[in-house]
Image (cartoon, helix red, strand yellow):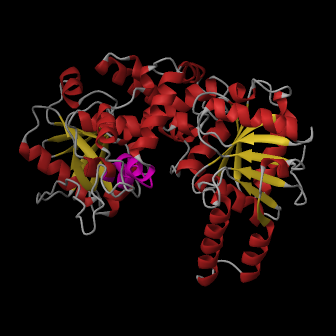
Amino acid sequence: MSALTTDARIAVIGAGAMGAGIAQVAAQAGHRVQLLDSRPGAAAQAIAGIDRQLGKRVQNGKLEAQAHRATLDRLQVAESIDSLADSDLIIEAIVENLEVKQQLFRQLENLCQPSCILASNTSSLSITSIAAGLTRPERLLGLHFFNPAPVMALVEVISGLASDPALARCLYHTAAAWGKKPVHARSTPGFIVNRVARPFYAESLRLLQEGAADCTTLDALLREGGGFAMGAFELTDLIGHDVNYAVTCSVFHAYYGDMRYQPSLIQKELVDAGHLGRKSGQGFYSYAEGAPRPAPSQLESQASIDCCEVEGDLGIARELLPRLREAGIHLTLRDGSGLLRVGDAVLALSDGRSASQRARASGLRNLILLDLAGDFSSAGRIAISCSADTSPQAMEQAVALLQRAGLKVSQVTDSPALVVLRSVAMLANEAADALLHGVASAADIDLAMRAGVNYPQGPLAWADRIGLAALLHVLENLQAAYGEERYRPSLLLRRKVAEGSTFHD
C-alpha cells in the first residue's frame, strides 16, 4: 500500500509539543490538518506557536515566505471531535494513559469512516493493548515521532498483534513522503529506541554511583571519545529526569523486573528533589545564569617519548597506530598478544576485565588499559585505567604517548570495560536481543538509533566493526566481574560468534 496522497485529510488529537509538531510536519508536507485539544484555546495557541517558529525560519532565510503561508493555511482548529469524522488518518498525541487512549480510540472507531487509519504517538504503551477494545483492532498502529517532531528524522511505525501489515506499509511510505526516516517495529516495551537506549544512561549512572569518575568527565569521554552528540548526564538533563526516569521504570516493569533495565537510585533522588534538569534549572549540572560548567579531569605528562613497541594485533585500537606515526613516534612491530610497550608501561585495549585482574592473570606489571574510541583515528579524548602496581613513572610514559597522538587523557578508577567500551557493548547487546526477538530488522535498529538519538553509528554495525568475538569476550568478563544477569550476553551474539557471521550478514 502506497503513501497517503496530499489530498488525504489528517487530524491530530493533542495540541501539546508533540501534537503540534506532528501537525506541522503533515501540513508542511501538503496535507490539510485539523488539530484538536480538549483544553479550550490550546489548538489555536499551538497553531500560533507554529506560525512564530516558521516566521523565524523565514527571517533566517531557511524557509520561503510562501511556504510559511501555505503551511498555516492548511492548519485548522477542530471545534469538536465530531468534525474529524471524514479524516483519512487520525494521530493521537494525548496523555500516556492506557485507559484514556483506549476510550478515545473506541470513540473514534464509532465516529470515523471504516477506511480511516488510527495511529497513536505513544512512546511506551502497547499498541496491542490500546487496540484491544476495538471492533477492528487491525486499523490501529503506532506512529511514534521524536521531539521536536519537525526536526527529528525518525518515525517508528509500530505494529500491534492485530495491526494490518498493509496499513503499516502505508504509514511507513507516508512518513517517508513527509521527509522522515521511518522504521518498522513490533509492539514490545520501549519499541526500538526507548529500549535499546537504556544502557546508554544506565552504565554512566552506574559508573557515577561507583565513583569511577565525575559527571563532566564521563560525559566528555562519551562525547569526545565515543563520538556521541552528548554524554548521558547532559542528555538526561535535556530530556528531563522525570521523563527519563519514568520511561526507565516503565520498561523495567514491562520486562518483569529484568535487571538490564534497573532504574538508578541517583536519578530517583534527583526526581524526588525536583532537580529535573534544564527545565528546573538544576540536574546533574546547574543551569542558573552564569553558572560555570566544571571541566573534565585530565592527566598531563612532561615525559619525552619518541618510540614504542607494538606486540601483535591491537584489534580495533590498531587505528591508533597511524596517529602515532604521524606524530613522529617510531613503532617497532613484534609478535605478541596485542600490547603497546612504552618505557615501563604496558598498554592494551580493555577486554572487559579490570586492569588489576588482567595484570594478575597475565603476569604483566604497570598495565594500563585503554578505553574504546568511536574512531581511534580522530577521537579527541580517551579513558585509561591502571593496575594497582602501576608506577607513577609508567603512568607518565603512557600519558605522554597518548598525548603525542593528540589525545586528551582522562583516568577512571579500575572499572571493568571502562566507559565507552562498556556503554557500546551494552547498547550492542540490547540491540542484538531486540533483533533476536523480532522487534525490528538489523538495518532498522541501526537507523533508529542514528536518526532517533543521533548515535554516531548503529550499535549492531558498531559491534560488527569491533568484532563480535571480542564483544562477546567483553560482556562475558563484565558478567563475571559483577556476577549479575544485567551483563548476560545475548543468545544471538553467541550464535553469531559460533557461526562466524555478523549482524548484517
Q: Is residue 150 visible?
A: yes
Q: Is residue 224 magenta?
A: yes
Q: Is residue 418 visible?
A: no
User: In the rendered view, would you say 460 is above or below 395?
Assistant: above
Please provide percent x and percent y for residue 403. Answer: 23, 58
Image check: 265 left or right of 202? left
Q: How many numbered marks have been drawn onto this rendered protein structure?
A: 0
- Quarter holding residue 162: top right
Q: Is residue 477 magenta?
A: no
Please provide percent x and percent y for residue 286. Answer: 27, 57
Please provide percent x and percent y for residue 486. Answer: 40, 22
Q: Quadrant of the N terminus?
A: top right
Q: Nearer the viewer, residue 369 or 338?
A: 369
Residue under the point 67% across and 40% down: 444
Residue under the point 35% across and 58% down: 323
Looking at the image, the residue that sits furthest to the front is 40
Image check: 376 left or right of 179? left
Q: Quadrant of the C terminus?
A: top right
Q: Nearer the viewer, residue 42 or 481?
A: 42
User: Which region is colored magenta?
Assistant: 220-239
Please provide percent x and percent y for residue 466. Answer: 47, 38
Image check: 144 left or right of 207? right
User: In the rendered view, would you say 321 is above or below 99?
Assistant: below
Residue under the point 47% across and 25% down: 252
Main structural element of the magenta stretch: helix, strand or loop? helix
Q: Nearer the viewer, residue 11 or 166?
A: 11
User: In the rendered view, would you say 120 is above or below 3?
Assistant: above
Q: Nearer the viewer, residue 205 or 424?
A: 205
